[in-house]
Structures are given as structure tokens and as C-alpha cells.
């Protein structure tokens, strides 16, 4: 383009070099950026102080750009870095702007090299004889303490025992079952004892895992077993033994069984206390009755003959003896002199009965006197064949209510009682009852065949 063309162009075609140029807005200062970031975060200076652990006065100085209020440049950089991280700003950019606004060139900070401490040469482990002895003694003391604690704990704790089979304390089995295996748990090595009334106890040893088992015999009816345990080394017994009841039902049509061990057929007794013993099943009790056959050496009679001897030979009342859980029964039966038939009868709940008779002879030699105190206490002093009974002594003794004493002499027994009405006598199987009144002291001489005589002996 020529100068002539430039001349033809009007002012509108030429640029106006005097027209102002629009400049970009200046970047916000560091304090402005900090204030804006805090306000965007929605916290005040007090909240920022709690969160950053920087005092509010230092945060306010940073937001004002008043760095003279801060402790120093090192602290200022630390505050700026932490505050920038808290506000979500780039800490390196914030520090760079801080240097620019202070007119400082951003230089790399020298790294602080901490000198390494001098290290002493490592030495190997050395054991002197004293250290070895001390270590061995310490180990020995600790081992002895552990052993002593174990023994004390063992001796202070009694063994335990429990039954796992049968699962319940009271159970019932089939009527055909005759044996059962009891099982349970106890202290390992403990001796477990199974006790049944009327039978020998069964002893077994618990296994290392504490289990034990014992095979027991079952009889018809209710079988009771007491299970205890004892530590053979400490001698301690289980504090709470276990009790098990196993019932073997009776057949509805089964009659009771009965065995009489005493008295034997044709036995002779020299006093009136005839022992009646035996076993029975399917019966809760047995009844003992007696029939007088006649005097010793006389003929057989179905009932006592009339006359004075009739009262002495009168049959006593039938005696009912309970049957124990193991089927045994036993009790004395008082009879006067003469020949008797004793009948033992067992009856089931269904009314079926079985009886066994025994013929016995009762004779008396000398004096057999049974003294019973009833209705209160009584002081007693006794002479047997003229000599003071050593059991009561020359001063006598007070006998409690319900107690029974027996005295046997060759020719006589003499009794001094402090209360004649509370003292009952049975002479050679014949009940005489009380011979006086309550509270009245009396002395009675018994020398059969003569009747009792009251004396003045004291």
C-alpha cells in the first residue's frame, strides 16, 4: 500500500492509538485468599482456633497481612502451611505467594543435617558365674512357687461328682431290667463310691478325662443309689454327693416273694426277744403274729390253758415291720416262756399274700428285766444279783424319756426309781407295766418265780 492510499483512508479506517486497553483484574492478595477460604468453609476465627490449635490472634494477623504480630518467619511459615491445609488451599502455593508479597525470592530451604551420634562398638553377651547362678536360682524359685500354688489349689478344692446316665435323678426302667450301668463325671483319678442300702458299696476310679461308670444290680421296687467321690491323695470328699432313684415296676399279677432268715425252725431262745429277719419283694411291710402252743415240755395246745398261766402265755399283738428299699426287714418280737408258732406274712398292694411259719421255744434262765422310761425322765439305780450295776454306778443316773435298758441276772434284779409311775417293767417277756405313781420314788425286787416285791433299799 502506497502513501497515496494511506491518504485516501479516512480516520475511521486508521486505528486510534490513543484508545485505552482493558487490563485483567489483579489477583487477590494472600490475606484476601485466606479470608475468602475461611468464609467459604463457614467457620469463624474461634472455630478455626479450636480446629488448628493456632491462636485466633495469629490467624487474624495472617488474614490482615500483619506479619509483625507473629513470633517469627519460621512460625509464620508453619502457621501458613497448617492454616492452608485446614482451609483446603495448596500450602506450597500459599508459601510462594507469601514470599512474593514480601519481595523475597523463593529459594530452597537448606536441609538440616543432624550429626549422627557416636556409636560404641557392640559387644557380645557375656555371662559371669554370678549371673548364671542368679538366673538358675530365679528359675528354681519361680518353678517352686508354681508347684506350691498348684498343690495349694489342689488341696483346697474338694472333688466333684455328677451323674450323666440316667439323665434324671428319678427314673423308671422296664420290669425285666435287672442291671444298670451308672455313668457320670468326677475329678480325674478320684475314687467314686456307689452306695446302696443293704448292699456292699461299689468303688470305681475316674478316668483321666473325668468319666466313670459302675454296673449296679436292680431289684423290683425303688432302688436308691448314693454316689460320692474322694480324692485319694488329699482325702477330701465331694461336698454334694448325688442321689439316684431307679424304680423297677412290679408285675400286676405277681405275688410277693418272702424269705425268713430268722428265727430258724425249732430254735430255742432264752429270752423273749425273738429276732425276726428276712427279705421280701413287692411288699411294703410284713406282719408277724404268734400262736402259743403250750408250756415247755408239755403237749400241743391251740390256745393257752385256763388258770393263772393263761395271762403269762397270752399271744402279743401282731407286729408290723416295714420293708426297706433293698427288700430287707427285721425287728425283735417279744414272747413269754413256752412253745410258739411265729407266722411272717407279706402282702402286696394287689392283696396277694404269702406266709412262712416258724416253730420256736422260749425259755428263761435267771432274770431278764427290761426297764423302759416313759412320760418323762426318771432317776435309776440297779443292783444285779446284789451288786451295783456298773453302767449306772453307785450314784445312779437320770434316764431320758423313751429310753430302754435291759438287765440280766442269775437270781435277782433290784431297781430303785425316782419316779415309779414313769418306769415300766417287762420281766422274762411278761409286761408288768408301771408299778407305782409318777413322782414317787420306790425300790422293786424282781426274783422269779416270786412276784415283784417293794423294798426299802436305797
Image (tube, rainbow, N blue to C red):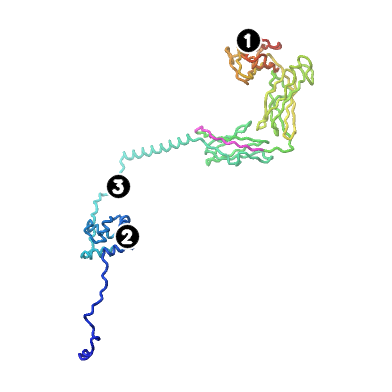
Secondary element at image label 3: loop
Residue at the extreme bottom: 4
Residue 106, placed above or below residue 321: below
Can you say which quadrant of the picture contains the C terminus?
top right
What residue span does the magenta drawing correspond to? 234-247
Viewer-proximal residue among 18 and 418: 18
Q: CA distance from mark 2 to mark 3?
A: 51 Å
Mark 1 residue crowding within 10 angstroms, few (<14) / some (14–19) / many (20+): few
**Mark toward the start of the polypeptide (3 vs 1):** 3
The residue identified by callout 2 is 86
The percent coordinates of residue 161 (x first, y second) are: 55, 37
Viewer-proximal residue among 354 and 88: 88
Looking at the image, do the residues carrying marks 3 and 1 touch, with CB atoms under 8 Å apart? no
The residue identified by callout 3 is 124
Residue at the extreme top: 456
Q: Nearer the viewer, mark 3 or mark 1?
A: 1
Amino acid at each position: 500500500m502506497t502513501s497515496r492510499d494511506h491518504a485516501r483512508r479516512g480516520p475511521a479506517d486508521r486505528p486510534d492509538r490513543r484508545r485505552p486497553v482493558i487490563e485483567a483484574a489483579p489477583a487477590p492478595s494472600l490475606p484476601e485468599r485466606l479470608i475468602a477460604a475461611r468464609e467459604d468453609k463457614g467457620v469463624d476465627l474461634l472455630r478455626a482456633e479450636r480446629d488448628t490449635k493456632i491462636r485466633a490472634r495469629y490467624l487474624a494477623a495472617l488474614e490482615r497481612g500483619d506479619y509483625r504480630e507473629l513470633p517469627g518467619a519460621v512460625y509464620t511459615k508453619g502457621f501458613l502451611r497448617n492454616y492452608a491445609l485446614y482451609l483446603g488451599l495448596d500450602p506450597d502455593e500459599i508459601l510462594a505467594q507469601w514470599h512474593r508479597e514480601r519481595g523475597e525470592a523463593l529459594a530452597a530451604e537448606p536441609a538440616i543435617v543432624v550429626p549422627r551420634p557416636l556409636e560404641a562398638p557392640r559387644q557380645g553377651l557375656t555371662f559371669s558365674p554370678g549371673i548364671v547362678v542368679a538366673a538358675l536360682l530365679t528359675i528354681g524359685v519361680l518353678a517352686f512357687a508354681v508347684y506350691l500354688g498348684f498343690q495349694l489349689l489342689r488341696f483346697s478344692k474338694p472333688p466333684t461328682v455328677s451323674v450323666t446316665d440316667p439323665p434324671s435323678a428319678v427314673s423308671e426302667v422296664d420290669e425285666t431290667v435287672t442291671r444298670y450301668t451308672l455313668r457320670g463325671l468326677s475329678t480325674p483319678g478320684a475314687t467314686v463310691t456307689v452306695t446302696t442300702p443293704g448292699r456292699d458299696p461299689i468303688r470305681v476310679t475316674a478316668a483321666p478325662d473325668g468319666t466313670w461308670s459302675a454296673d449296679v444290680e436292680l431289684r423290683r421296687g425303688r432302688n436308691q443309689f448314693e454316689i460320692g467321690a474322694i480324692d485319694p491323695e488329699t482325702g477330701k470328699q465331694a461336698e454334694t454327693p448325688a442321689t439316684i432313684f431307679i424304680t423297677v415296676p412290679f408285675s400286676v399279677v405277681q405275688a410277693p416273694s418272702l424269705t425268713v432268715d430268722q428265727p430258724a425252725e425249732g430254735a430255742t431262745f432264752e429270752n423273749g426277744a425273738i429276732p425276726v429277719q428276712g427279705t421280701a419283694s413287692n411288699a411294703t411291710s410284713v406282719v408277724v403274729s404268734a400262736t402259743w402252743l403250750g408250756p415247755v415240755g408239755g403237749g400241743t395246745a391251740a390256745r393257752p390253758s385256763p388258770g393263772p398261766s393263761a395271762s403269762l402265755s397270752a399271744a402279743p399283738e401282731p407286729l408290723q415291720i416295714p420293708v426297706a428299699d433293698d427288700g430287707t426287714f427285721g425287728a425283735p418280737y417279744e414272747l413269754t416262756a413256752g412253745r410258739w408258732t411265729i407266722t411272717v406274712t407279706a402282702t402286696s398292694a394287689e392283696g396277694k399274700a404269702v406266709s412262712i411259719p416258724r416253730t420256736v421255744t422260749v425259755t428263761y434262765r435267771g432274770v431278764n428285766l427290761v426297764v423302759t422310761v416313759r412320760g418323762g425322765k426318771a432317776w435309776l439305780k440297779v443292783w444285779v444279783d446284789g451288786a451295783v450295776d456298773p453302767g449306772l454306778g453307785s450314784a445312779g443316773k437320770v434316764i431320758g424319756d423313751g429310753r430302754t435298758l435291759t438287765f440280766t441276772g442269775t437270781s435277782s434284779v433290784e431297781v430303785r426309781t425316782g419316779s415309779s409311775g414313769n418306769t415300766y417293767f417287762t420281766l422274762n417277756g411278761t409286761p408288768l407295766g408301771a408299778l407305782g405313781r409318777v413322782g414317787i420314788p420306790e425300790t422293786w425286787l424282781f426274783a422269779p418265780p416270786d412276784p415283784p416285791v417293794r423294798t426299802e433299799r436305797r
